[in-house]
Image (spheres, grey):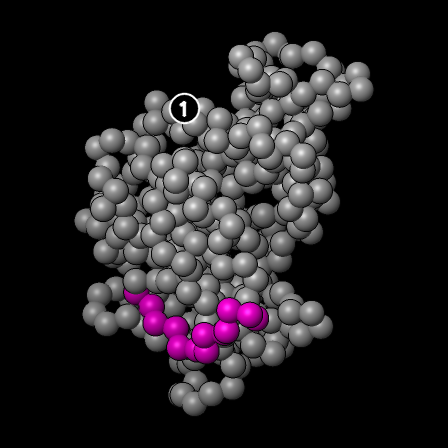
Amino acid sequence: MAESHPPAGATIHDGVEGWTIDGSSDDPSLLDDATELLDLELPDPRFVDSSYLRWAYRENPLGRAVERYQQIPSNGSAELVAHYVNVPRRYRGPGGERTNGGWSLNAVVKTGHQRSRHFQRLGKEIYEEEAANGWSFVIGVTNAKSTGAVVKYMGWKLQAPLPVKVIHPIGRGRPRKRVSHTRVTDEWLDSADFSDLCATVDRHTVDGWATDYTPDVLRWRLACPNTRYAVHIFDDMVLITTRSSLGPIPACVILKIFPLVGGGSPLDATRAIRSATRWHRAAFAVYAGFNGSVTVRGIVPPMRLRPSPLNLVVRRLDPAFDDDTVKLDTFEFLDMDAY
């Protein structure tokens, strides 16, 4: 825990208990305390130590995250009661256009402090800093409970609930012409095979905005701590997956689909998904999101069998970007921080 008085560079707001730290400090206790708070309020296996936050906030090849920490004095030390972060992201759009933006994550307020409106205040500071740095827009995913609040009070716009499909591993269809299944390791990310992959993926045209997976960004994303990925290369597309479970039942989670051919009708990814599911020895596959170049055929699970619905929201930062122009071509699990 940090000391109970504001450190150098902290901001004190009238009428707000404690002080705000912007994250520019390399004090390791900030990430330690944020990990502890997130694990308390939003439990996740990745919060075993601060390595996940260090990767997400500090090792991104596009730069450091825009961070806010709200601390209050408590029993001779500083207690973290609210935390919010946006990480930098590069988006590509129609005609090869690129723009700087962000991804919103880890908005958390400690139980007992929610009525202090820390999230709204920290968010306002973050968005103003990002706009000053030339970011165009930021994307986030909210649950059904929080969507209304961020839209009403924080300037976000709801794009759509993320569609979810479940795919059975067995089905009709010709076998793939070329199949390669590879587990992602640190050695593989430094190999010529990874470089060859980067030379072929994310080269297709898009009709809206999508994450720009340059080699450095893709390497960083697949180096997420405490997570295991696999890459499946077919004749016409590449899949990135992970293995999860629904209770005791293993599942293949489809994180990203990269088409290897551009133009024409969307590619049907169903047979490739079934192949990856069998390789994982999983009972079924789950795909959430949408891809302008790909079609996924599967069963839409009933709402009662899903976790809290995920809603895709977008917040404009640059006034020159009209809300109606911030339309996404592709958004999948790899584009968020769920895995």
Residue 153 on the magenta segment: no
Q: Is the magenta stretch mostly helix, strand or loop?
A: loop
Residue 296 on the magenta segment: yes
Q: In this view, does 48 lie above or below 247?
A: above
Q: Which residue is drawn at 62% across and 58% down?
A: 228
Judge whether residue 3 can be spotted in this image. Answer: yes
Horizontal placement of 182 versus 202: left or right?
right
Residue furthest out toward the bottom: 172
Q: Give the range drawn in magenta.
A: 293-305
Task: Tell me which amino acid carries mark 1.
Answer: Glu
- Residue 127 position, x and y percent, is 40, 29
Q: Mark 1 points at which residue?
A: 129
> In this orientation, which residue lies closer to the viewer: 319 or 66?
319
Identify the element where label 1 is drawn. Answer: helix
Horizontal placement of 173 versus 220: left or right?
left
Q: Is residue 236 above or below residue 171?
A: above
Horizontal placement of 215 versus 32: left or right?
left
Q: In which quarter of the image is the N terminus?
A: top right
